[in-house]
Structures are given as structure tokens and as C-alpha cells.
Amino acid sequence: MAQLQLVPASILQRVFLIKYGTSIGSSFTLDIDGKQYLITAKHVLNGIKKEDKIEIFHKEKWETLNVKVLFCENPATDIVVMAIPVQLSRTDEVEATSKAMFVSQDVFFLGFPFEMWTYFGELNNYFPLPFIKKGILSATDPRNNQGGIFYVDGNNNPGFSGGPIVFYDLNDHKIKICGVIHGYINQANEIPQTALYAKGNSGILVGFMIDSAIEVIKKNPIGVTVK
């Protein structure tokens, strides 16, 4: 009998809505070697300095959060890691890996499309809860010169950038984080009875493999100790 695949609270409650300047996107916590970090897409924090401030949505308002920023070794990799001064999420055991994924399997991606969110107050420590969408792992490209990337057949929306992509490991039957949402591939849609084209969503989501984030964290273990 097939295992029912659901996104558990251990994933759902580690996704956060963040802002840097006028740019708003999604992010998520990752616990590595007993320390917690905040991960997002680098383009969400365009221009951020090694020591800087971002804003995080909490109790239905924006709050300032000091961060120390770790950049991936490959500057083309659209991932940035932030060491944070406080623990943001509970510390359930959630593995992060891009290994053990199979092309054609289902994946889930989480974030805040068009800055939309749901709110359950104390249930999520007064942080908003993200939307969850589902797709199929269409292709992987681990040797891409931007860093390992993969493609998902799934209708991504603006605002999901920086959120986590998760999959169900068929070997040990656990949900794991495999990547960071970069965006989607555009396509040109012809406007009838004109010579014009409109840019549209092709339905192909692009994600960066989480391995680059883990690598820079291992080299710079400066995150807050989790309890």
C-alpha cells in the first residue's frame, strides 16, 4: 500500500515571510549540527551586506532581524544563508539533501504567493503559515555552472522565491528538504490579432539544490544554537 504523502508541521512551521528593502519573498530555517540558519534565494536579498538587517513578518507586522550573511562559493548560485540571533522555529529533525530524489516523483514547494498567507496565532507562534503547492520532478542538472539545479512541473507564483522544495524519500519514508525556489521559466504568449507577445508562466519551476547551502554552513558554523 502506498504511503500517504503529507507536508508535516516540522516543515510547515519553518517557513517565513521576509523583506529586504522593497523586495519580499519566502525563506525557511535549516538546522545543521545543532545550529539554526535562515535560507532564501539570493535575488530576494539583492545587495545585502555580510552584516545587515532584514524584516520578518510576525504578529501581523514587520519586525527587524539582524543577520550575518553567508554566500555560496559559486556566485551564480541563487541561495543565501543567514545566521540569525534567535531561534525562529522548533527544532524537529528534518534532513536537507538533494540525494535520493527520483525524476517523475512528486515534490512540494512552500511560500507566500503574492504576499498571501494564513494566520493561526499562537498555533504557529504568531508567524504566518505559508501556502503549499505540488509538482513533479521533471529533470535534474547537478553539474549546471550555476550550481546544481532541477526543474519541477508545477505552477509557481511570484512570492514563492526563497521557499523550500521538499520531497518524500522513498528509501526511508521521510519528508526532506531538497532545494530552494528560484523562480519559473517564462514563455512568450502571442496576443491574438496583434504582432505582440505577453510574457507568461511556462509552468516549469526552477530550484537550486540545497547542497550549496549545507556546504557553506559546514564551513561557517555560526548559527544560533537550537534548544
Image (cartoon, rainbow, N blue to C red):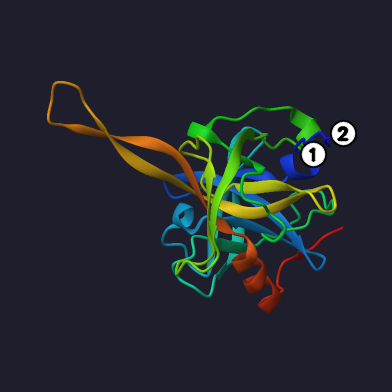
- Extreme residue toward the top, this view: 193
Q: Residues within 10 Å of mark 1 (few under 14, many from 20)?
A: few
Around disc 2, counting alpha carbons within 10 Å, would you say few (fewer than 14), some (14 to 19), or many (20 or more)?
Answer: few
Image coordinates of residue 96 in percent, x first then y, are: 72, 58
Q: Between residues 221 and 50, which one lies in front from this camera angle?
A: 221
Considering depth in this image, is 151 or 80 the residue closer to the camera?
A: 151
Q: Residue at x 46, y 62 (%)?
A: 48
Q: Nearer the viewer, mark 1 or mark 2?
A: 2
* Residue at the (16%, 31%) spot, across then down: 196
Q: Is residue 31 left or right of residue 216?
A: right
**Callout 2: SS:** loop
Instruction: Give percent across and percent down for residue 2.
Output: 83, 35
Residue linked to disc 2: 1
Q: Amino acid at mark 2?
A: Met
Work out whether mark 1 precedes mark 2 in sequence or the reverse, and give the earlier one: 2
Question: Which mark is on residue 9?
Answer: 1
Looking at the rendering, in which quadrant would you find the C terminus?
A: bottom right
Residue found at x 54% / y 45%: 152
Q: Which mark is residue 52?
A: none
Residue 13 higher or lower than 67, as above or below:
above
44 over 199 or under it: above or below: below
Q: Give the SS element for disc 1.
A: helix
Relative side of 191 to 57, left or right: left
Instruction: Tell me the amino acid under the disc marked 1.
Output: Ala
Quarter of the image for the N terminus: give it: top right
Q: Is residue 29 left or right of residue 53?
A: right
- Which quadrant of the view contains residue 80? bottom right
User: In the picture, residue 129 is in which quadrant?
Assistant: top right
Residue 118 image position (x, y, % from top left): 65, 27
The total of numbered circles placed on residues is 2
